[in-house]
């Protein structure tokens, strides 16, 4: 099982964890069911894909809050 992190906006790969880790130790248990639906994708192989936000997109959103209306910051 691997956990893959990518930016939800620009799809940049942020990193991955390939060693055996319990998802609760990563704080996934603290997410609401809606947050889990929005952020986590479980694959049949056991991999988890996490949609997060990279520093560049975060900075762009802080400077231009209207970008929150878009599905992807980088069009």
Image (cartoon, rainbow, N blue to C red):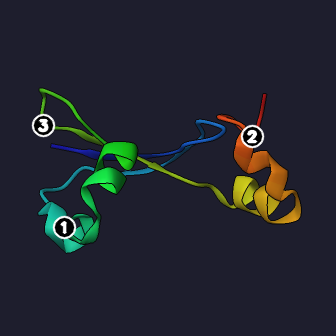
Left or right of 60 in this view: 4: left
Mark sitting earlier along the chain (2/1): 1
Note whether 10 is above or below 75 in the view shown.
Answer: below
Q: Nearer the viewer, mark 3 or mark 1?
A: 1
Mark sitting earlier along the chain (3/1): 1
Left or right of 35 in this view: 69: right
Q: Are marks 3 and 2 in contact (CB under 8 Å)?
A: no
Q: Position of residue 38 (x, y in %)?
A: 39, 45
Q: Nearer the viewer, mark 3 or mark 2?
A: 2
Q: Which mark is residue 46?
A: 3
| C-alpha gap between disc 2 and disc 1 | 28 Å
Name the residue located 63 percent from the left edge and 55 percent from the top edge. 54
> Observer-nearest residue: 3 or 34?
34
Q: Position of residue 10 (x, y in %)?
A: 66, 38
Left or right of 64 in this view: 19: left
Note whether 22 is above or below 14 in the view shown.
Answer: below
Q: If the image is split into quadrants, where does the C terminus sit? A: top right
The quarter holding residue 55 reads bottom right
Name the residue located 25 percent from the left edge and 55 percent from the top edge. 33
Q: Secondary structure at mark 3?
A: loop
Furthest-right residue in this view:
63
Q: Secondary structure at mark 2?
A: loop
Q: If the image is split into quadrants, where does the N terminus sit? A: top left
Q: Which mark is residue 73?
A: 2
Left or right of 29 in this view: 65: right
Mark sitting earlier along the chain (3/2): 3
* Circle 1 residue: 29
Q: Position of residue 58 (x, y in %)?
A: 71, 60
């Amino acid at each position: 099982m691997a956990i893959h992190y990518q930016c939800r906006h620009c799809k940049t790969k942020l990193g991955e964890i390939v060693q055996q880790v319990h998802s609760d130790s990563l704080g996934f248990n603290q997410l609401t069911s809606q947050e889990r639906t929005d952020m986590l994708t479980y694959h049949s192989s056991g991999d988890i894909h996490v949609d997060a936000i990279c520093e560049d997109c975060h900075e762009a959103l802080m400077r231009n809050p209207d970008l929150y209306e878009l599905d992807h910051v980088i069009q």
